[in-house]
Amino acid sequence: MSAEKVNLGAELAIRSLVERAPLASSLAAAYKAAGFRLALVGGPVRDAILGRLGNDLDFTTDARPHESKKILNAWADNTWDTGILFGTVAAKRGDVTVEVTTYRSDKYEEDSRKPEVEFGDTIEGDLSRRDFTVNAMALELTGAQPEFIDPYGGLDDLVKKVLRTPVTAQQSFSDDPLRMMRAARFASQLNFDIAPDVSEALAAMAGRISIISAERIREEFIKLLLSPNPRIGITILVESGLADLILPEIPKLKLEIDEHHHHKDVYEHSLTVLEQAIAQEERLGGPNLVIRLAALLHDIGKPKTRNLIPGGGVSFHHHEVVGARLTKTRLQALRFDNETIEAVSTLVALHLRFHGYGDGEWTDSAVRRYVRDAGELLTHLHVLTRADCTTRNAKKAERLAHTYDSLEERISKLAAEEELSKIRPDLDGQEVMQLLNIKPSADVGKALDFLLELRLEHGPLGKERATDELMNWWRSRRRS
């Protein structure tokens, strides 16, 4: 790399660091006073050059972890050392969070899920073990002047928008197989290509991802999915074979299509639905993991339910039911939390409900049930349903959008009239027990279910009518 580029990279990084993270200089001074070196490293250097440095900063040092802890205890407002066995001590001062890691080189033994950590003595050795060259740049802060360190051409690769490894891709992925997931994730986050040798290594070594824990895979996949362009990363996962091992339902969407049994490309459709859902995320307050998972997974029941119709055509009866079950199983395998699992599987189960709406033939009762079943996920369901229209027929797309507009208008009208988001029986459990002169029992639950059905069917009944209906129901049960 030319001296001019090195100087440019250093200038951009230093300017960004001074503007966005002035506390870094005081931290460097603290390390220097203790006789140690400190350098900004990895993603923050990359982001500093790109002009988007955040408040989470990563540093590397020749100080051993216990020395870093002493320095950070004196410098920071708060410190924590949960990663100290891996050489990392974290701290927060003001609104800036820092992680300081001793020079190290991690690698996995052939069948181990845990990396072996070895501390090093030089920053160049530390950088050689980084995942990609664009993350293997450093800005040394404890010299007379800040020094830009880029032994593997990361600045060139940053300019070219390509992901390349500091050492051979085979060695890098062997040392830490999770880097294969990171290749897909960074490609999505940065809108970068991956170098040919990286692509080849991904395909050749995909099976090695099996030694990585589900939790670490999940975290990388979440970052990929919440990136600006998840299609890029998902495509890399599928084409490399990684998806076959961590999310096999997605490549299975590439259903074979013959001349007699035409249907849309389910895999391409799912990626388009994901993109169209992302385009509507302002309704959900910004990037939303639940809607992105639901959009990607909404049709994963189709491969198991595909039925070739004699004479041509294809059906996927009940694929939403099968898909919801598969979604729950897959997200559990990836160790997602229960709330996310339930939300995503519920949306997958409900994603076809609107298609029974026709041209607006639903009764008010059906609209209430739609809202009740969606619950707190109603806006998510609105987004998913609208995103699920990928037809190239402009008139059909316009008609579906108009029809859904009318459904949302009906929901808004009923909501204003009936507090639709809080649908509940007109009588509570205590009132039911008093009226029926019964103690807490299964009969109370059955009575409340009866009243809820009436509420859904007819709207608010009021206390008087609800009491009459309840007493009639109770008398008819006792007679039978």
Image: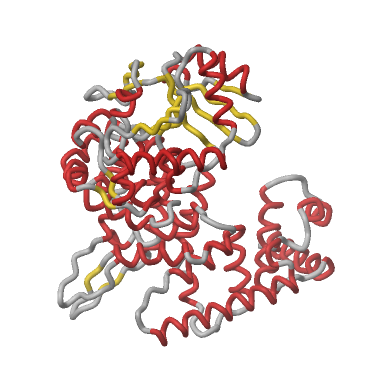
Q: Quadrant of residue 380?
A: bottom right
The number of numbered badges drawn on the structure is 0
Residue 334 seen by the camera: no
Q: Position of residue 272 (x, y in %)?
A: 37, 66
Q: Position of residue 131 (x, y in %)?
A: 31, 35
Residue at image point 38% right, 55% down: 230
Q: Position of residue 35 (x, y in %)?
A: 49, 12
Q: Is residue 217 left or right of residue 314?
A: right
| Colouring | secondary structure
Residue 341 seen by the camera: yes
Residue at the bottom extreme of this rendering: 395
Q: Is residue 233 above or below residue 19?
A: below
Residue at image point 56% right, 37% down: 21
Q: Quadrant of the C terminus?
A: bottom right
Q: Is residue 141 left or right of residue 217?
A: right
**Residue sitting nearer the eye, 316 or 405:** 405
Residue at image point 39% right, 48% down: 224
Residue at image point 78% right, 64% down: 471
Q: Quadrant of residue 366?
A: bottom right
Q: Quadrant of the N terminus?
A: top left
Q: Is residue 171 above or below residue 455?
A: above
**Residue sitting nearer the eye, 391 or 34:** 34
**Residue sitting nearer the eye, 38 or 335:** 38
Q: Is residue 261 above or below residue 319?
A: below
